[in-house]
Amino acid sequence: MLSVILVGAAGCIYGEGTQVTPPSIAGYMGAPIITSGQQQVGLWVSGEGKSTAAPDIVLLTLGIEADSKTVARAQQDAAQAMDAVMKSIKANGVADKDIQTQRFSIIAVRQWIEDQQREIITGYRVTNVVIAKIRQVDKAGTIIDAVAQAGGNLTRIDSIDFSIDDPTHYYNDAREKAIDDAMAKAKQMAGSAGISLGKLIYMSESTPYVPPVAIRDYAIKGAAPAPITTISPGELEIQVNVQMIYEIK
């Protein structure tokens, strides 16, 4: 009895801060299958397809970091600064649903005393970090400036990532190109080898991981912000790879 293995699909956006799962390739050929007895039989080909798109959202990771001799004072300073930062974000059109707390921590700040060979606590640090989804890409620089002014010296901006809110269309376009590429290769190889292609017996989709394009470690520590912060989103590249196996007649 031959076993049947269902083949899944996966993919990613080049330049995106978060990985997005594309629509399944199954729609092109039903549920793609390969039987164990066919794994080493037939003509194997791979195809690559790419699609480019301008990002339509910005994921801004920002927060407040406050130090003080006591936890209560550090927390109070952080809360006041964060309240001002949140108000500035919302005033620039970012909705409540697009703001999510990523990290909140209270830690002791320690110092090693060499002559005493011991560690002492010199104060406490409160950190509050959120991710804001900015749906108006051209307002990213304005929002950064507003956050810096609102949070003052306690402001921290960790990263700026560009993404596409709904990448389905671009995945579909890249996938079609990848399938066309693989089919063209199969026909060329069969023609050169003097063989005839049979039915398609296997198809899979995969994409190697590529780190997202982002602006990192944009920290505002003490210095006054520039009047205007310029942010250039550029383009994102979406790539889909497929592998196909044909029977040989």
Image: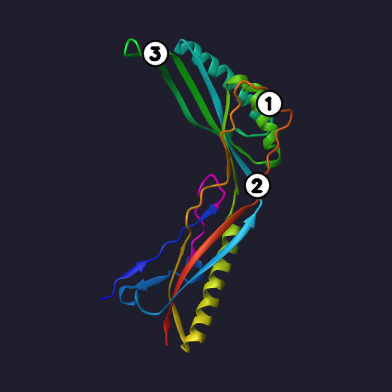
Alpha carbon separation for disc pair 3 and 1 = 32 Å
Task: Tell which circle, 2 or 1, labels the residue nearer the N-terminal end.
Answer: 2
Tell me the chief SS of the magenta region.
loop
Q: Specify whether residue 234 is painted magenta.
A: no
Residue positioned most to the front: 115
- Which dot marks residue 208? none
| Tag 1: amino acid | Pro
Residue at 65% x, 47% y is 56
* Span colored in magenta: 14-25
Task: Find out whether the residues at labels 2 and 1 contact each other: C-beta distance under 8 Å.
Answer: no
Residue at 46% x, 88% y is 195
Mark 3 crowd level (few <14, some 14–19, many ≥20, 10 Å Cα) = few
Q: Is residue 188 above or below residue 47?
A: below
| Tag 3: amino acid | Ile
Numbered label tally: 3
| Tag 2: amino acid | Asp
| Residue pointed to by mark 2 | 56
Residue at 50% x, 67% y is 27
* Residue at disc 3, secondary structure: strand
| Residue pointed to by mark 3 | 121
Left or right relative to 53: residue 125: left
